[in-house]
Image (cartoon, rainbow, N blue to C red):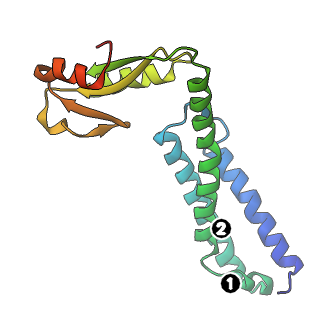
Amino acid sequence: MKFDRGLFLALSVFILVKFVCLHLLGCYRRYWRFASTEDLLQIASACAAISLSESIILSVAYVYGQSDVHLLPRSFPISDGLLTFVGVGAARLSVTAFDKSARQRRSVSSPEKVVIYGAGNAGVALLDAIRQNSQPTLEPVAFVDDNPKKFDLKIRGISVLGARKQLPELCDRSMQSEL
């Protein structure tokens, strides 16, 4: 395949478009140690903007008859946007995973196992606070909640085991030391 100067120019413009879209949509202003699904949605928005911008540039180039651009398939912007999402998302979220792993390894003693009472917003907020602690002394092993619709669900990887009435039995089974 012949690699022409015009094709090189088009790919250079697409790379510039990526950097501009990621910058304008705030992907370089985030603290990735605490990345969440909101941050993943921000990356997805930036990648959609990248695909749209590249599609417009490619369409204009097709209309004005840039012969080198015809070497790129019309699906290129979509494929490029998806690959950018996977690449940027994996790179950014791996920072979160690495940090979490490092914090777990720094823990000198084995953390105390706990059951969180309440699997609603407050319980999840407590779970997040426990997990973000740089020196984890508590390890959530289960939720208990009086809402039967939540039984046997997993919330952020932690099971909802039952109701308050079952607490003594659940404490024995999960071998936790605190509620």
- Residue at horizontal 81 percent and vertical 65 percent from the top: 12
Q: Residue furthest right?
A: 5
Q: Position of residue 149 (x, y in %)?
A: 14, 39
Image quadrant where one finds the C terminus:
top left
Whether residue 175 is situated above or below residue 70 in the rendered picture: above
Q: Is residue 26 visible?
A: no
Q: Residue at x 53, y 14 (%)?
A: 109
Q: Which residue is mark 2?
A: 54
Callout 1, which amino acid? Val
**Image quarter for residue 73?**
bottom right
Q: Residues within 10 Å of mark 1 (few under 14, many from 20)?
A: few
* Above or below: residue 38 compared with residue 49: above
Mark 1 element type: helix
Q: CA distance from mark 1 to mark 2?
A: 14 Å
- Residue drawn at x 77%, y 83% is 66
Q: Circles 1 and 2: CB distance less than 8 Å?
A: no
Query: Which is more toward the observer, 24 or 169?
Result: 169
Which mark is nearer the camera, 1 or 2? 2
Q: Is residue 162 left or right of residue 136?
A: left
**Residue 42 coordinates in the image, percent (x, y):** 53, 46
Q: In the structure shown, which secondary structural element does the residue marked by tag 2 occupy?
A: helix
Residue under pointer 1? 63
Note whether 76 is above or below 127 in the view shown: below
Disc number at residue 45?
Answer: none
Q: Residue at x 56, y 30 (%)?
A: 100
Q: Nearer the viewer, residue 50 or 125?
A: 125
> Percent from the top left, x then y, of residue 80?
64, 66
Q: Which amino acid, by three-letter code, is at mark 2?
A: Glu
Specify whether residue 58 is in view. Answer: yes
Asked if residue 41 lies left or right of residue 116, the reply is right
Instruction: Estimate how packed mark 2 is, as few (under 14), some (14 to 19) or many (20 or more) residues with alpha carbons within 10 Å.
Output: many
